[in-house]
Amino acid sequence: MTTGIESEIIVLSFYRAAELHGARLLLNLMNHLRDGETQAKLTRHIADETRHAWLLTRRIAEVGGVPREVGADGYQRQLGRGIALPRDVIDLLALTLVAEERALARYTFQAEHPAVAAATREVFRAVSADEQWHIDWVRQRLFDLADQRSLDERKILQKVATYRAAEERVYAALLQAEAMLT
Ligand SMILES: [Fe+2]
Ligand SMILES: [Fe+2]
């Protein structure tokens, strides 16, 4: 039987893996968006995501564990399987936007959930504080780039909607893991 602490470690490990995969996606974006302003934003963003991964890791250590391998069940890996591989910078930005929206929604939910331990709730609160900025600048950069390339805004919105729909499908695995915690 899975104990409360074990469930907590599994859920924290899930989020930790998602943060680290998010950081990898952002490092990838760094090769595509070379202008100084975006490089500065990406650097801050990557620093945030790796810090989030650390806060989650530290909380796992506090409850007496080590990070679990979430492997094939990991949110980002499932997401990668559920959708066409992003080839273009527009796709990478759209996918990042969708993942950031989900992160904010889940961290906010977890931070308010009464069954979550107080110290863990504090971690979710600290982490969620950064996510709105991530959403805002990525969305802005996506639409600016679309504008520069004279792409139809409706096509971009459609692309984001397609990623969102794919994300909804793979999200079930994360919900299942969370159900063990709450
Ligand atoms: Fe994050
Ligand atoms: Fe984020």
Image: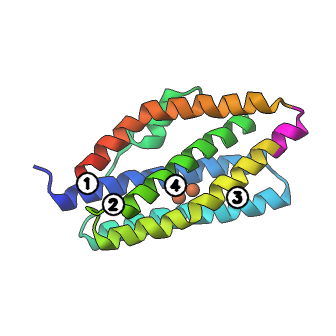
Compared across the picture, whether 161 is left or right of 19 comes to right
Label the magenta part by its dominant secondary structure: helix
Mark 4 residue CB less than 8 A from any atom of ligand 2: yes
Q: How was this image coloured?
A: rainbow
Q: Is residue 65 magenta?
A: no
Distance from the alpha carbon under mark 1 to that under mark 2 = 8 Å
Q: Is residue 147 magenta?
A: yes
Quick check: marks 1 and 2 in contact, CB under 8 Å? Answer: yes
Point out residue 109 in the picture as x, y percentages from the top left corner: 41, 56
Q: Amino acid at mark 3?
A: Leu
Relative to 21, say whether 122 is above or below: below
Which dot, 1 or 2, sits closer to the camera?
A: 2
Q: Which residue is mark 2?
A: 113
Quadrant of the frame with the C terminus:
bottom left
Q: Amino acid at mark 1?
A: Thr
Distance from the alpha carbon under mark 4 to that under mark 2 = 14 Å
The mark that comes first in sequence, 1 or 2, is 2
Q: Tell me what residue is drawn at x 84 percent, y 60 percent.
A: 36
- Marking on residue 182: 1
Which dot, 3 or 2, sits closer to the camera?
A: 2
Q: Which residues are drawn in magenta?
A: 144-150
Point out residue 95 in the picture as x, y percentages from the top left corner: 61, 39
